[in-house]
Amino acid sequence: MTLKPNRIVLLVLVLLSSCTIHKANLEKTDVKTTDLNTLSQEFLQTIKDGKDTEAIQDRIARITMDELTQSLVNDAHKLAFWINIYNAYIQVILMKNPEAYEDKGNFFKKEQIPIAGELLSFEKIEHGIIRKSRWSLGQGHIRKWFPNKLERKLRVDKRDYRVHFALNCGAKDCPPVSIYYPEELEVQLNKGTELFLKQNSDYHPEKNEVAVTSLFNWFRGDFGGKQGIKKILKEFEVIPTTQNINVSYKNYDWTLDLNNWITL
């Protein structure tokens, strides 16, 4: 089919118009980003040094959603950032108001962490973002049916059971606080898991029994059930074999303890 001159001109105008619109959209989303992982690391380091964190908290509150999605490009960046943020705000909030820990259910559910124009709860960060939309009371077996848009946008792509030995909830039996870096995350999570398990597990070979942290019980689905727990304990040399080993869970000491730091 032969196009008439006026139709050719019209077609060229349409194509040019489409290119202009596409370019405008790209420019609209081209925002200046910040290394949010560095910001989260500085947040924890400032707390550890006993210095004021208000300026850093203000910067975190004013982070944009574009900065979050463009700076946290993969699970290593997401986990390092959100673990640091979770642990930092546990310290900041409870150092200022330790009485808030008396009602732990309300404390973890309360929307009190300002980020990107939103108020997030510790539960949202832990179970929604870090654990990829798992129901907090489902022992790791049940996912949330209808996670909101924010959660779906920010959450990790894959769950990693080792985060349970990195998140510090403020209690004496919680894993210690360390500063996590995305480029070192794999080594740090392995080291933190090994140290915590060896310090908090009691193996009794004469009874074929191992007593472990209640974290294994509360989130057993994240660990692959009881058999998965045994494999993890063997992998980190807490027990010599997974055969004929009985697993029991220790009572959890919820005494507030904020001075619990470690370098991994």
Image: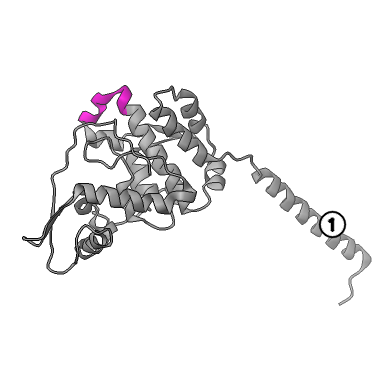
Q: Secondary structure at mark 1?
A: helix
* Amino acid found under the numbered disc labelled 1: Leu
At a point 24% along the width and 24% down the height, the residue shown is 99
At a point 60% along the width and 40% down the height, the residue shown is 33
Residue 109 placed where, x, y %?
30, 37
Residue at the disc numbered 1: 13
Give the residues in magenta.
94-102
Magenta segment, principal secondary structure? helix
Instruction: Say if residue 16 shows up in the picture.
Output: yes
Q: In this view of the protein, which residue sits in the foreground, 79 or 2?
A: 79
Residue 216 placed where, x, y %?
22, 53
At a point 23% along the width and 57% down the height, the residue shown is 220
| In magenta stretch: residue 191 | no
At a point 29% along the width and 30% down the height, the residue shown is 259
> Which image quadrant for residue 120?
top left
Q: Is residue 51 left or right of residue 100?
A: right
- Toward the left, the furthest residue is 207
| In magenta stretch: residue 101 | yes
Residue 264 placed where, x, y %?
38, 44
Q: Vertically, is 206 above or below 196?
A: below
**Quarter occupied by the N terminus:** bottom right
